[in-house]
Image (cartoon, rainbow, N blue to C red):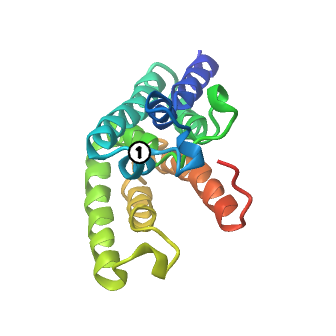
């Protein structure tokens, strides 16, 4: 049963809504920007971006909900599956986005109180980043990824007492960190 839940979580993650929106608008978003929510905000606009954000959060929440039908140890594996599905979607040639919204959706559903606290930490760090650097190109690290790093580190600490909580947060972080490393090394083909 757990293997089916993990597989379904990966398939849910592989439904890359930003790529679908780009195609609906007549272009491949991966040729212009990141195939993620932030790319849709930049390339298509705020209205489309908000819609994509909700759908991407929803697919992460769907994977968290699915994980509840299995043993507790399935949650970290469903988490890594949904984020990996977004980053390496089977339906789009294994070239996707960053996975942040899908990870946030999973965390919001599975770790509600801890995630809300982490979101406040992330928002504060984004504010500090903007106050210090003003523009992303000064550091080479965007404000949202910068804030997400601190938000997920806080979430890792906040979920430490939950069954499989820290392991689930690590599972959300690992594929995004690996993708980030590929981007920094110039090996990302997304």
Q: Nearer the viewer, residue 4 or 166?
A: 4
Does residue 68 appear anywhere in the picture?
yes
Residue 152, position as x, y percentages in the image? 43, 58
Q: Quadrant of the N terminus?
A: top right
In the rendered structure, the answer to whether residue 1 lies left or right of residue 54 reads: right
Q: Which residue does the numbered mark 1 point to in the structure image?
A: 40
Residue at disc 1, secondary structure: helix
- At horizontal 38% and vertical 61% (from top left) the residue drawn is 151
The residue lying at 60 percent from left, 39 percent from top is 84
> Going 45% across and 28% down the picture, which residue do you hit?
24
The relative height of residue 180 versus residue 106 in the rendered view (above or below) is below
User: Which residue lies most toward the front here?
Assistant: 26
Left or right, 145 with reference to 179: left
Tell me residue 149's x, y (percent): 46, 64
Nearest to the observer: residue 16 or residue 152:
16
Q: Nearer the viewer, residue 92 or 110?
A: 92
Residue at horizontal 44%, vertical 68%?
Answer: 146
Residue 80, image quadrant: top right
In percent of width and height, residue 184 lies at 66, 67
């Amino acid at each position: 049963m757990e293997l089916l839940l993990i597989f379904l979580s990966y398939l849910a993650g592989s439904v890359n809504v930003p790529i679908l929106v780009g195609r609906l608008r007549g272009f491949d978003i991966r040729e212009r920007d990141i195939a993620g929510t932030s790319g849709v905000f930049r390339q298509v606009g705020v209205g489309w971006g908000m819609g994509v954000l909700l759908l991407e959060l929803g697919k992460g929440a769907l994977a968290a909900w699915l994980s509840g039908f299995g043993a507790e140890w399935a949650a970290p594996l469903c988490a890594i599956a949904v984020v990996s599905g977004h980053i390496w979607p089977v339906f789009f040639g294994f070239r996707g986005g960053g996975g942040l919204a899908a990870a946030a959706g999973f965390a919001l559903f599975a770790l509600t109180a801890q995630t809300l606290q982490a979101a406040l930490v992330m928002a504060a760090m984004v504010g500090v980043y903007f106050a210090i650097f003003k523009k992303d190109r000064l550091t080479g690290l965007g404000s949202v990824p910068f804030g997400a790093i601190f938000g997920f580190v806080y979430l890792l600490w906040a979920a430490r007492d939950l069954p499989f909580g820290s392991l689930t947060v690590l599972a959300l972080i690992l594929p995004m960190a690996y993708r980030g490393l590929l981007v920094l090394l110039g090996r990302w083909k997304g």
